[in-house]
Image: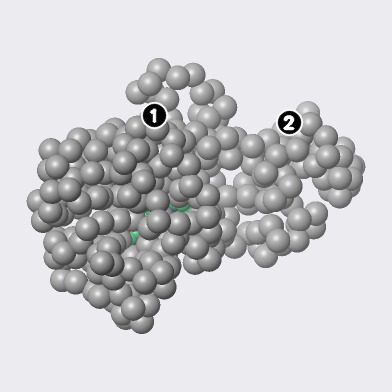
């Protein structure tokens, strides 16, 4: 018998993920409060319901893909009573660790299995079905979810118990924010030292400065033709989303007593780019332009 699925939250990520579930042959009901997504959802083969609870009621497995922890918790509070005991709920949003743990506890009280399974790969990965999933929760829930997650993604890692997926996502994106700034500072300094960008790239990409922010997502135009720097920094991954993830890293560091000075500095710089410079809609690699444009007194 085909597994019955529901997906709640049909935004930039949720809609293409849901379309891949339909393509994989899963019956999929869907809900989003934004009426503007209804036509696109129907065109993708989804059955649009009148509420989140209605979508979840008939489902064996429910996926949520929502903007924040508080919204995810309110949606889970609405749908868990509608789900049958023994069902499975998976949150794929990026949320704070405290909300994530509360959600797992709420599901356990409703006798519903739960996983946190945040993703990386962006809208391109969601559309192509090549997302990376970082999963936290019980091994048997992971085993149940795996074929469904494989319909939307290519790389799956079971990171540990409840919350481990969010922890992996938050730590990974803190590395990404810090390393993008490090690479941008190096190019800004190289410019002022008269070193060509190509020479700087050719050396650092084969030497100890090598990292993903440099070799796959280079923040200056030229060396990596597919990077957003070559198309006016259209996202990609918007700076506002990087700020969201860095804020989550700092909330997690505060609650866990972890020392993350470079994470704090990266958060402050992305806050400046987003909230002071008003550039949250540009790709996060455009932080190069902000850094390069700031002269330091000699
Ligand atoms: P989005 O804002 O495009 O979509 C969120 C959707 O949730 C919207 O359609 C909104 O109407 C819906 N929603 C809001 N409140 C709701 C409610 N109470 N009930 C049901 N639906 C509700 O966001 P997105 O870009 O699709 O991102 C979703 C999540 O994935 C976020 O947590 C984000 O951090 C994470 N993420 C995004 C990307 C990316 O590149 N966009 C990459 C990785 C992870």
Position of residue 253 measured from the top left corner of the image (x, y, whole percent) = 42, 25
View quadrant of ligand 1: bottom left
Q: Is residue 206 left or right of residue 132?
A: right
Q: Is residue 95 left or right of residue 81?
A: right
Q: Quadrant of the N terminus?
A: bottom left
Q: Is residue 40 above or below residue 72?
A: below
Position of residue 176 measured from the top left corner of the image (x, y, whole percent) = 58, 40
Q: Residue at x 83, y 39 (%)?
A: 206
Q: Is residue 182 left or right of residue 271?
A: right
Quadrant housing residue 233: bottom right
For label 1, the residue is 252
Q: Is residue 179 above or below residue 128?
A: above
Quadrant housing residue 207: top right
Q: Is residue 248 visible?
A: no
Quadrant housing residue 96: top left
Give the label, 1 or 2, closer to the camera.
Answer: 1
Q: Is residue 210 visible?
A: yes
Position of residue 80 measured from the top left corner of the image (x, y, whole percent) = 15, 50
Q: Residue at x 70, y 39 (%)?
A: 211
Q: Residue at x 26, y 56 (%)?
A: 61
Q: Earlier in the sequence, mark 1 or mark 2?
A: 1
Label 1: how many residues lie within 10 Å, few (<14), some (14-19) or many (20+)?
some
Q: Secondary structure at mark 1?
A: helix
Position of residue 286 measured from the top left corner of the image (x, y, whole percent) = 63, 51
Q: Is mark 1 within 8 Å of ligand 1?
A: no
Front residue of this view, candidates 222 and 113: 113
Front residue of this view, candidates 226 and 166: 166
Q: Quadrant of the C terminus?
A: top right
For label 2, the residue is 297
């Amino acid at each position: 018998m085909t597994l019955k699925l529901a997906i709640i939250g049909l935004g930039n990520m949720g809609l293409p993920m849901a379309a891949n579930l339909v393509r994989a042959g899963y019956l999929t009901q869907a809900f989003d409060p934004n009426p503007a997504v209804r036509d696109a959802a129907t065109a993708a083969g989804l059955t649009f319901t009148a509420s989140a609870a209605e979508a979840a009621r008939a489902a064996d497995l429910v996926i949520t893909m929502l903007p924040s922890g508080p919204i995810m918790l309110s949606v889970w509070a609405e749908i868990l009573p509608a789900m049958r005991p023994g069902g499975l709920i998976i949150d794929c949003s990026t949320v704070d660790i405290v909300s994530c743990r509360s959600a797992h506890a709420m599901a356990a009280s409703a006798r519903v299995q739960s996983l946190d399974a945040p993703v990386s790969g962006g809208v391109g990965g969601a559309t192509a079905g090549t997302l990376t999933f970082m999963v936290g929760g019980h091994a048997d829930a992971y085993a149940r979810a795996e074929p469904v997650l494989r319909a939307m993604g290519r790389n799956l890692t079971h990171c540990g118990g409840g919350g481990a997926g969010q922890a992996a996502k938050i730590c990974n994106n803190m590395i990404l924010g810090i390393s993008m700034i490090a690479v941008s500072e190096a190019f800004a300094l190289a410019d002022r030292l008269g070193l060509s960008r190509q020479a700087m790239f050719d050396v650092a990409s084969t030497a100890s400065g090598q990292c993903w922010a440099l070799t796959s997502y280079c923040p200056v135009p030229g060396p990596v033709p597919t990077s957003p720097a070559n198309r006016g920094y259209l996202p990609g991954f918007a700076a506002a989303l990087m700020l969201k993830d860095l804020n989550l890293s700092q909330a997690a560091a505060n609650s866990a007593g972890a020392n993350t000075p470079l994470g704090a500095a990266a958060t402050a710089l992305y806050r400046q780019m987003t909230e002071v410079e008003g550039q949250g809609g540009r790709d996060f690699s455009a932080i190069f332009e902000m850094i390069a444009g700031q002269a330091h007194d000699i």
